[in-house]
Image (cartoon, helix red, strand yellow):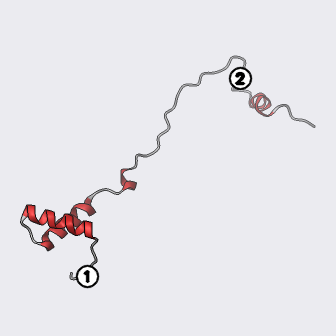
Amino acid sequence: MRTTITLEDDVVAKLKDRMARSGASFKETLNENLRRGLEQPTEDELARPFRVRPRPMGLRSGIELDNIGGLLDLLDGPVQP
């Protein structure tokens, strides 16, 4: 595909340096470096997923998990009429 692009001065300098070291043409150097850049994973792909690490919390003495009403009273206070 043929297209016209505008390259910034620092990019041109880096491409010319790579061309001089490799002996490749401008087209070959540009295409190779574009391929390398496009094959790099993006930041989203590199981001580690959030993981929750469970820790034992233990139980307080005097709290019965079998009594839901009692637990609600402990958290919210007794029901007021």
Q: Amino acid at mark 2?
A: Glu
Q: Quadrant of residue 14?
A: bottom left
**Residue wearing tag 2:** 64
- Quick check: 62 above or below 7? above
Tell me the crowding category of disc 2: few under 14, some 14 to 19, or many 20 or more residues within 10 angstroms, Cα based.
few
Q: Amino acid at mark 1?
A: Thr
Which disc, if any, is residue 60?
A: none
Upstream in the sequence, badge 2 or badge 1?
1
Tell me what residue is drawn at x 26 percent, y 70 percent: 9
Tell me what residue is drawn at x 90 percent, y 35 percent: 80
Q: Nearer the viewer, residue 44 or 15?
A: 15
Quarter of the N terminus within the rendering: bottom left
Residue 81 position in % (x across, y down) = 93, 37
Position of residue 65 in the picture relative to residue 53 (left or right): right
- Quick check: 66 above or below 36? above
**Residue wearing tag 1:** 4
